[in-house]
């Protein structure tokens, strides 16, 4: 995954505010599918990989010279709902998208989904994990990853089982993603017998001394941060400079080499990052992972990274619908309710709520600028 952030600047040049056509052709004999997320902001390193995964799936499909080709059109929301909403409206009315891969983040998903519901446009997020998203009764919304109840439960159990932590300090960024994830980790750790304490930081800030002092006073065995890697790296750096040596853990928002870049390689060493996503270039989980990773590397000259496989699988669901002759948004949405096909990250199948039928949590260890897979959170040891 070390090449993901390095590519972001180059990719940003071709990602205009309202998006730009990528490979493929729409028009009379084709359809347009959108991809929405933070493609140029400070957390773009966790959005560019699923965009590339989706592009790869669509390019492979178009190369078969199908009856209905697909254009993937990108919409750079920078992860902000106030930008994402007008982009979604334009995508529906101007670009006539028949489906959307994204939005990538939970906050923008909460704001964009009602627009898509009104426009009757099916969506599949490769990375939005907020649990509440699946409880809105939306008929056109789907995601390919497990939610924060699953992720938080997996991390919390790992902390008390594998790390045998008795005191756990949970920090979150008060976002629609970070806060509920942190709360679930805390609740699970308490169930596992740990004593806990919680604090929140302002992700727009730069001085986290107050939180560092609370952590030092509590003297935990483990620290969990619910938030994104840009702020997580700064927080971890200040914790280490403050003399805190407890194991640092975080969720999928920190699964990027940017965490070590912000914290310093030595400060980030041996941190554990959890994710309901699969990054498996060695094919540990399945031969499909290795085959996908090799093809991804050949196409983008970069290793597979966070949510690249899930972006590929989200695009695969749309491709299967179109291959079956469905080219209108409502027909595609109807097909998604019964799709059941092998993906790279999991079997692609949705529950009536739009949640994935299968969801595992994996843990990764920070080693320099790399994040090798340890294994499933329910089985892994460190």
Image (cartoon, rainbow, N blue to C red):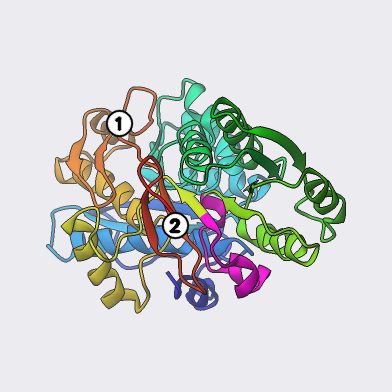
Q: Main secondary structure of the magenta part?
A: helix
Residue picked out by circle 1: 357
217 horizontally vs 246: left or right = right
Q: In which image quadrant can residue 108 be found?
A: top right
* Number of numbered callouts drawn: 2
Asked if residue 307 shows in the view, the reply is yes
Q: Horizontal and vertical percent for residue 143?
A: 40, 38
- Quarter of the image that includes the N terminus: bottom left
157 horizontally vs 347: left or right = right
Q: Which mark is residue 226?
A: none
> Is residue 267 or residue 203 the one in the foreground?
267
Q: Which mark is residue 364?
A: 2
Asked if residue 226 shows in the view, the reply is no
Q: Horizontal and vertical percent for residue 55?
A: 33, 62
Identified at 81% across, 53% down, the residue is 212
Q: In which image quadrant can residue 115 be found?
A: top right
Label whose residue precedes the other's in the sequence (1 or 2): 1
- Judged by depth in the image, the label closer to the viewer, 1 or 2, is 2
Element marked by disc 2: strand
- Quarter of the image that includes the C terminus: bottom left
Bin the neighbour count of mark 1 within 10 Å (Cα to Cα): few under 14, some 14-19, many 20 and up: some
Identified at 58% across, 36% down, the residue is 185
Q: Horizontal and vertical percent for residue 274?
A: 48, 49
Q: Is residue 376 above or below residue 181?
A: below
Q: Horizontal and vertical percent for residue 62?
A: 20, 62
State yes or no: discs 1 and 2 in contact (Cβ < 8 Å): no
Q: Is residue 213 above or below residue 187?
A: below
| Residue span colored magenta | 252-272
> Is residue 357 or residue 77 the one in the foreground?
357
Bin the neighbour count of mark 2 within 10 Å (Cα to Cα): few under 14, some 14-19, many 20 and up: many
Identified at 70% across, 46% down, the residue is 220
């Amino acid at each position: 995954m070390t090449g993901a952030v390095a590519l972001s600047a180059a990719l940003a040049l071709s990602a205009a505010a309202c998006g730009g056509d990528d490979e493929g052709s729409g028009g009379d004999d084709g359809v347009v599918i959108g991809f929405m997320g933070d493609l140029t902001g400070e957390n773009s390193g966790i959005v560019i990989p699923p965009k590339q995964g989706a592009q790869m799936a669509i390019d492979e499909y178009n190369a078969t010279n199908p009856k209905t080709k697909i254009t993937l059109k990108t919409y750079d929301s920078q992860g902000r709902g106030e930008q994402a909403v007008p982009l979604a409206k334009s995508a529906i009315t101007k670009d006539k998208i028949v489906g959307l891969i994204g939005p990538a983040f939970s906050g923008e998903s909460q704001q964009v989904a009602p627009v898509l519901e009104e426009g009757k446009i099916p969506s599949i997020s490769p990375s939005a994990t907020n649990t509440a998203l699946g409880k809105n009764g939306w008929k056109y919304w789907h995601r390919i990853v497990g939610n924060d109840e699953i992720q938080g439960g997996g991390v919390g159990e790992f902390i008390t089982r594998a790390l045998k932590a008795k005191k756990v300090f949970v920090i979150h960024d008060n976002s629609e993603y970070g806060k509920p994830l942190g709360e679930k980790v805390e609740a699970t750790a308490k169930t596992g017998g740990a004593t806990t304490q919680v604090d929140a930081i302002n992700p727009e800030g730069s001085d986290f001394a107050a939180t560092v002092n609370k952590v030092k006073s509590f003297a935990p065995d483990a620290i969990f941060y619910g938030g994104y890697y840009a702020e997580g790296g700064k927080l971890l750096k200040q914790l280490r400079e403050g003399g805190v040596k407890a194991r640092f853990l975080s969720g999928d928002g920190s699964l990027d080499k940017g965490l070590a870049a912000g914290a310093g390689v030595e400060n980030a060493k041996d941190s554990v990052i959890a994710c309901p996503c699969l990054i498996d270039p060695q094919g540990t989980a399945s031969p499909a992972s290795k085959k996908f990773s090799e093809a991804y590397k050949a196409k983008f000259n970069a290793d597979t990274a966070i949510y690249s496989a899930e972006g590929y699988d989200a695009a695969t669901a749309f491709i299967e619908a179109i291959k079956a002759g469905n080219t209108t948004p409502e027909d595609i949405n109807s097909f998604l309710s019964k799709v059941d096909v092998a993906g790279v990250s999991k079997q692609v199948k949705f529950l009536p709520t739009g949640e994935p039928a299968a969801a595992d949590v994996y843990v990764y260890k920070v080693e320099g600028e790399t994040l090798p897979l340890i294994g499933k959170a329910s089985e892994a040891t460190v």
